[in-house]
Image (cartoon, grey):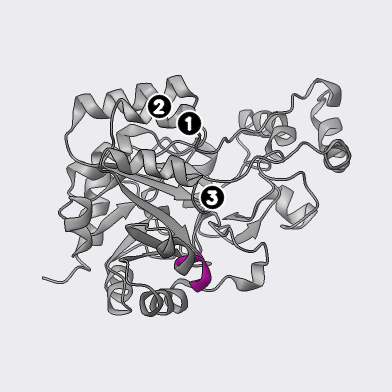
Amino acid sequence: MRLQDLLGVALPIIQAPMAGSQGSALALAVADAGALGSLPCAMLSRDALRAELATIAARTTRPINVNFFAHTPPEPDAARERAWRAALAPYYAEYGIDLDAIAAGPGRVPFDADTADVLADFRPAIVSFHFGLPAPELVARVRAWGAKVLSTATTVAEARWLEARGVDAIVAQGLEAGGHRGMFLSEDLATQVGTFALVPQVARAVRAPVIAAGGIVDADGVAAALRLGAAGVQIGTAYLRAAEATTSAVHRAALANEAAVTTAVTNLFSGRPARGIVNRLMRERGPIGATPAFPLASAALAPLRAKAEAAGRGDFSPLWAGQHVRCPETSAAAITGELARGLPD
């Protein structure tokens, strides 16, 4: 079965869910253009999730992909938290921030029974996960209303693991991809390979449709991914400056600054590896460091990020982007149309 038939869309193009840079407006615009729009849900409260799903339901009958994290929440570690805040202390002093006034908190929550209850009222056609899959009983609830289930693999072993658990399609995320690595069977970054090495390996290893993700921003990239065995593509960075995206001003400015666009994989912003534009924090601390476990690292950075962004700086912001930073400042429909030129006739 063709990917577009499986997903119920005209084009085998998926707009990657990008928490912090979009809401339902971008997902709807991509859906209107014939591709699969996605709604990132890991950072939404239950009320916010319900409101976004209601907006989508009122606006379209086209399928939308709703995306969630499937990580296991860590036990807070006071020693790791103290060490992390001590490492950031010079920055707190620079901005006059009271270290004792900084609240702790996860920032991102995994898919759970309460979330499934909200989704059941809307029955989205496609539900995707990052960092593996939630508990089997939760996946079964999603499947009960007929939803297709997608998840991300960063290695052949992860792709086989997902197929063995019945996912309908697998997103093969190469090392070029912006945002969080979807890795879940290993924490070893040495296991991570580029998109055009990963896709053919995964396509040979599994029978489920493979969706290429990472470093694909134009029609040529789309065509190349399909030639290597992908059934479709998932694209994020190209949409970051779309008119319908909510990407912050400092993030948009960084993306537009060709002289400064260098990306690296870092764990500083959340405690888990993710690719973003190199900024002051990454340069001065090094991109990989000792932090609280995911997602607890982000709380200590929140006040620094707010202060810096208020001054127009992204020094402490997660400026997620893939290695191929090409993101035109135009409509989502125009971006989707350009990508679609890489599809076979």
Magenta residues, dominant SS class? helix
Quarter the N terminus occupies: bottom left
- Residue at point 29%, 23% (across, down): 54
Q: Secondary structure at mark 2?
A: helix
Q: In the rendered structure, does residue 191 fall within the stretch colored magenta?
A: no
Left or right position of 132 against 163: right
What amino acid type should be assigned to the residue bearing mark 3? Trp
Q: Secondary structure at mark 1?
A: helix
How many numbered discs sit on the rendered protein? 3
Residue that mark 2 sits on: 117
Q: Given contact means CB atoms under 8 Å apart, are the residues at marks 2 and 1 in contact?
A: yes
Q: Nearer the viewer, residue 236 or 154?
A: 154
Left or right position of 279 against 241: right
- Residue at point 32%, 66% (across, down): 208
Residue that mark 1 sits on: 113
Q: Is residue 214 visible?
A: no
Q: Given contact means CB atoms under 8 Å apart, are the residues at marks 3 and 2 in contact?
A: no
Outermost residue toward the left in this view: 345
x, y percentage for residue 282? 71, 53
Q: Residues within 10 Å of mark 3 (few under 14, many from 20)?
A: many
Q: Residues within 10 Å of mark 1 (few under 14, many from 20)?
A: few
Q: Which residues are magenta?
A: 154-159
| Earlier residue among tags 1 and 3 | 1
Choose mark 1 or mark 3, whichever is in front.
1
x, y percentage for residue 204? 37, 80
What amino acid type should be assigned to the residue bearing mark 2? Asp
- Residue at point 34%, 47% (across, down): 329
Q: Residues within 10 Å of mark 2 (few under 14, many from 20)?
A: some
Residue that mark 3 sits on: 320
Q: Is residue 285 above or below residue 32?
A: below
Left or right position of 103 against 30: right
* Disc 3 to disc 2, C-alpha distance: 31 Å
